Image: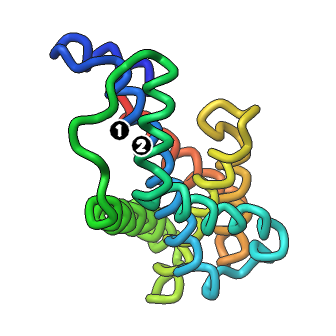
């Protein structure tokens, strides 16, 4: 997706370094908000997610520090300087980053709702299941993202989501079906 964004941006005369910087920021904000969404759903998830994937939550403070304008702006300026490119005309602000994290958090909730709607078709209902679905989807995506040897988290993301849905009370085959349908929806969205 990053290379596709850079190429699409070039068509509209957006410099590649701006597209690359935006893509990197987008990934950092997506991961931060995804881990925060996981924390919202974690108390309602049935498995031993916290003890298995505790290491993923260590990224939250690191990402929040990296996204702080006093850290982020100099890093971007330095990186672009090394490429002999000018620094951005407008520095990033905490307000913009906070807004982006909030909007992304809403997107995680919507993604979790797609899981909950499918789970409800298999008999798992209620507010607890909804919050667990949000947390399970976000956890699966974030851990899949952090496991860098799996392209786009393929495999680990589906295994984690299936395990979380099974712990929620779904039959394993239903959980796998939901994880695969969710992956298909995500791929369509990327396209």
Image location (x, y in percent) of residue 190: 38, 33
Residue nearest the viewer, comparing 120 with 89: 89
Residue ID at (72%, 66%):
58
Could you say which quadrant of the image residue 135 lies in?
bottom right
**Dot 1: element:** helix
* Above-or-below relation of 46 to 135: below
Are discs 1 and 2 less than 8 Å apart at CB?
yes
The answer to whether one can see residue 1 in this image is: no
- Give the CA distance from mark 1 to mark 2: 6 Å
Q: Is residue 180 above or below residue 23?
A: below
The answer to whether 157 appears left or right of 138 in the picture is right
**Is residue 34 or residue 64 the one in the foreground?**
64
Query: For the point 41% across and 27% down, which residue is it?
Result: 20
The residue wearing badge 2 is: 185
* Residue that badge 1 annotates: 189
Answer with the quarter of the image where residue 109 lies. Answer: bottom left
């Amino acid at each position: 997706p990053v290379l596709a964004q850079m190429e699409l941006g070039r068509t509209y005369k957006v410099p590649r370094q701006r597209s690359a910087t935006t893509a990197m920021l987008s990934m950092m904000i997506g991961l931060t908000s995804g881990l925060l969404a996981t924390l919202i759903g974690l108390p309602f998830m049935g498995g031993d997610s916290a003890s298995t994937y505790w290491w993923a939550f260590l990224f939250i403070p690191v990402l929040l520090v990296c996204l702080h304008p006093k850290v982020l702006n100099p890093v971007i300026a330095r990186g672009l300087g090394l490429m002999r490119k000018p620094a951005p005309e407008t520095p990033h602000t905490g307000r913009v980053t906070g807004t982006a994290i909030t909007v992304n958090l809403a997107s995680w909730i919507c993604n979790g709702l797609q899981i909950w709607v499918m789970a409800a078709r298999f008999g798992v209902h209620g507010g607890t299941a909804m919050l667990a679905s949000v947390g399970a989807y976000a956890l699966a995506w974030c851990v899949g993202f952090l496991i860098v040897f799996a392209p786009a988290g393929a495999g680990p993301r589906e295994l984690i989501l299936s395990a979380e849905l099974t712990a929620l009370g779904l039959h394993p085959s239903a959980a796998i079906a939901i994880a695969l349908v969710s992956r298909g929806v995500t791929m369509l969205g990327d396209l």
